[in-house]
Image (cartoon, rainbow, N blue to C red):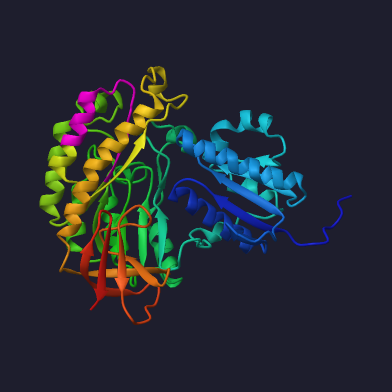
Amino acid sequence: MQTKKLHKDKVNIITLGCSKNLVDSEVLSGQLSANDIDVQHESTQDDHNIVIVNTCGFIDKAKEESINTILDQVERKKDGELEKVYVTGCLSERYKGDLSAEIPEVDAWFGTMELPLILKQFEADYKQELIGERLLSTPKHYAYLKISEGCNRTCAFCAIPLMRGGHVSKPIEEIVAEAKKLVSMGVKEVMLIAQELTYYGLDIYKKRMLADLLRQLSDVEGLHWIRLHYAYPTKFPLDVLDVMRERDNICNYLDMPLQHISDNMLKAMKRQITSKDIYELIDTIRDRVPGICIRSTLIAGFPGETRQDVEDLKAFLEKARLDRVGIFTYSHEENTSAYELEDNISAEEKEERAQEIMEVQQEISYEKNQEHVGKTFKVIVDKKEAGRYLGRTEFDSVEVDNEVIINTDEELPIGEFVNVKIDRAYDYDLEGTVV
């Protein structure tokens, strides 16, 4: 016979990795809360008895962070501070068998699509009617909006399809309903996320439907900014640019991971695009949406990368002058096609190449930011830190891009928009005064 607990469970969810994981944690929080279970996200208090670690398994550094976090929580359990430790997310999906043998103290392991099974641990029901309902872990004025799951691409370096499966689009009406719900909660900006935005609709509508989705989202009253993340460059649907140009609340911002520019590397990475195609696509995007901010990510140290490939990448940055760039060092991932290649560049050399490439981009970023001095921008106020307000323009996404340091003697409501005249510019930030 089961004995009743003398206390009510209190759950803390720890999220690692990308914004897609964050959305999963928010949905899990919403389901637990709807089942009358006390839940918090990344609480700094030690008043919970159960921890759920939502892991990342993307690259070596992320896997190491996930494992260390699990071990930390297991230690807390051994010390009597926790009753249960559950693990979900990409690392758990990919290595569940190995990890459960190595860390038997974890009470249960779950894959990326096993939310109902997690709820069963709490004798809770998955509430279908709660689709789109989440407990936001972001500040209430912005949120991530996931439009699909999985990916059908076969990039040589990427293990995401192994962990998230094939591409599955959400129906447009479901996404629009979720956006309306977010707006009713105070959200003014949504960041559209997926493993691959531009594939959206091909599975359920038999054609690319991102432009149609954007039109309907743009009509949602109270949604001030819509931002596009993770757009694959191959077969990019150009009608998206027309909608972006026509609609004021779609940010002139595009996050398009390119990974490399050398034809040798693009072919080895199985990117299905050439250097010439990339240059032409960037020209087309800028021609159709003048003033657009293009963000990209690159990979340094892929197997077989030569010094000439690195020089080509630096020359590309000088010529294309992308607005925002992030860079990863190559991680040798099991069961990807690149795993069959020799990982022949040392970790130190990968880091040196990444630094060398980013130094080129740092100078470009500084020069581009200097062009903003004297101009006035609409800025959303994100937070107050060390006595001053920090915000972003439409050309900057959360955490990964520039911030605007806002100088004012007035109290500014967090989440509101203000006009800021830029007085100074730095490598990656702007500073200005409310006008």
Q: Is residue 281 at all visible to an observer of this figure?
A: no
Instruction: Note whether 311 is above or below 221 in the view shown.
Output: above
Q: Is residue 6 at all visible to an observer of this figure?
A: yes
**Residue in the foreground of this view, choosing between 157 and 314:** 314
**Residue in the foreground of this view, choosing between 207 and 358:** 358
Who's the residue at 62% across and 28% down the image? 98
Q: In the image, is 20 to the left or to the right of 106? A: left
Q: Quadrant of the C terminus?
A: bottom left
Instruction: Note whether 343 is above or below 289 in the view shown.
Output: above
Residue found at the very far right of the displayed protein:
1
* Picture coordinates of residue 46, whole percent (x, y): 68, 59
Instruction: Note whether 223 is above or below 252 in the view shown.
Output: below
* Picture coordinates of residue 106, whole percent (x, y): 69, 40
Q: In the image, is 335 to the left or to the right of 155? A: right
Who's the residue at 40% across and 17% down the image? 340
Instruction: Note whether 10 is above or below 375 in the view shown.
Output: above
* Picture coordinates of residue 211, whole percent (x, y): 25, 53
- As for residue 49 lying within the magenta part, the answer is no
**Residue in the foreground of this view, choosing between 43 and 53:** 43
* Picture coordinates of residue 355, whole percent (x, y): 31, 37
Who's the residue at 22% across and 26% down the image? 309
Q: How many labels does the image show?
A: 0
Residue found at the very far bottom of the displayed protein:
410
- As for residue 307 lying within the magenta part, the answer is yes
Span highlighted in magenta in the image? 296-315
